[in-house]
Amino acid sequence: MKFRYLILLVAVLAMSCGPKKGIVTKKKRSSTTKTVVVKDKKEEVTTVETNPSVVEENKAPSSVEVYIDLYAEIAKNKMQTHKIPASITLAQGILESGVGKGLLAVKANNHFGIKCHGWTGAKIYHDDDRSQECFRKYPKAEMSYEDHSEFLTGRKRYASLFELKPDDYKGWAKGLRAAGYATDRKYPEKLISLIERYNLDKYDEEVLKGTTAKSTRKSTTIIEGTKKDASKKHTVAKGDTLYSLSRLYKTTVDAIKAENNLKSNDLTIGQQLIIPN
């Protein structure tokens, strides 16, 4: 009997001394860590959960978007008063001024590269098609926009453009190049690309639907005495300047300043002005 127990003990010892098989534990369902045991060694493998919902960061507006925000209302006003598509005015301003960062825009507030051509105001000289050409210089960028509109409406070579549909920005882009506004052969394509990339034609639509700032500005006419003595009150809106108001009401900057006792050309939104006859 003792001999049988002895044989059994030897057999158990022989089995315990044999090669050990690797033991692998099942993966625990965990979103962060899973533990694996291989040949008596414990290894921890860290997994990273991925969130299926992607959160987009708020991106800062581009320089073009900032420019559009600054001058869109002015371009819309010019469309209403001069019949030039706001999309074309904005696209030209972006392109010609280098989004307001070009030398002419910075030093002369000239956003459209308009040369002197009989100009009697301030001037600046800059290399363009030729060395040191003469360009117009303005006190404020808004005046550049006003002069751009006057420049196009006052020259016969652009007259055919005003026969186009008011929202035909493609026709305007091609017509400007054909009329000699720019020498760059790709000028129309560049304007059209800007308009379509930044949806500038929506401002044309707003004007045509009567949603411009001008249509909502509060302006009243007060009749005092005879019609000859009639005076007007104007509430300053975004984009208004003394120069643009003088053109709108067919008067002069000095006359408006004198009527309102203004010491400077600065205006504030909501300011009430008396417009002289």
Image (cartoon, rainbow, N blue to C red):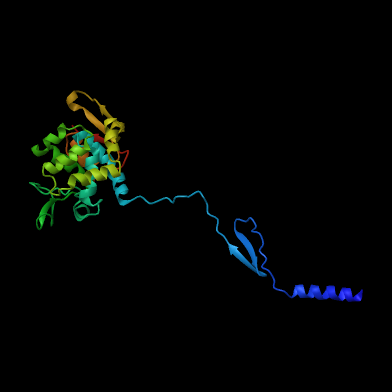
Whether residue 71 is situated above or below residue 232 in the rendered picture:
below
* Rendered-image quadrant of the C terminus: top left
Tell me what residue is drawn at x 22 percent, y 49 percent.
95
Quarter residue 193 falls in: top left
The residue that appears at 21% across and 27% down in the rendered structure is 230
Corner quadrant of residue 199? top left
State whether residue 257 appears in this view. Answer: no
- Whether residue 183 is visible: yes
Residue 221 shown left or right of residue 122 in the figure:
right
Q: Residue furthest left?
A: 118
* Position in image of residue 163 (x %, y %): 15, 31
Q: Is residue 150 left or right of residue 87?
A: left
On-image quarter of the N terminus: bottom right
Q: Is residue 144 above or below residue 171?
A: below
* Residue occupying image coordinates x 9% and y 56%: 130
Residue 115 position, x and y percent, is: 12, 49
Work out whether residue 152 or residue 180 is closer to the camera in this orientation and state it.
180
Q: Position of residue 221 (x, y in %)?
A: 25, 28
In this rendered view, identify the residue nearer to me: 44 or 27. 27
Return the x and y of residue 249 as percentages of the image width and height.
19, 33
Residue farthest toward the top in the current orientation of the protein: 226
| Vertical side of 181 occupied by 4: above or below | below
Hey, which residue is sitting farthest right in the picture? 1
Q: Is residue 178 above or below residue 207?
A: below
Q: Please name whichever residue, 237 or 89, is drawn nearer the observer in this view of the structure.
A: 89
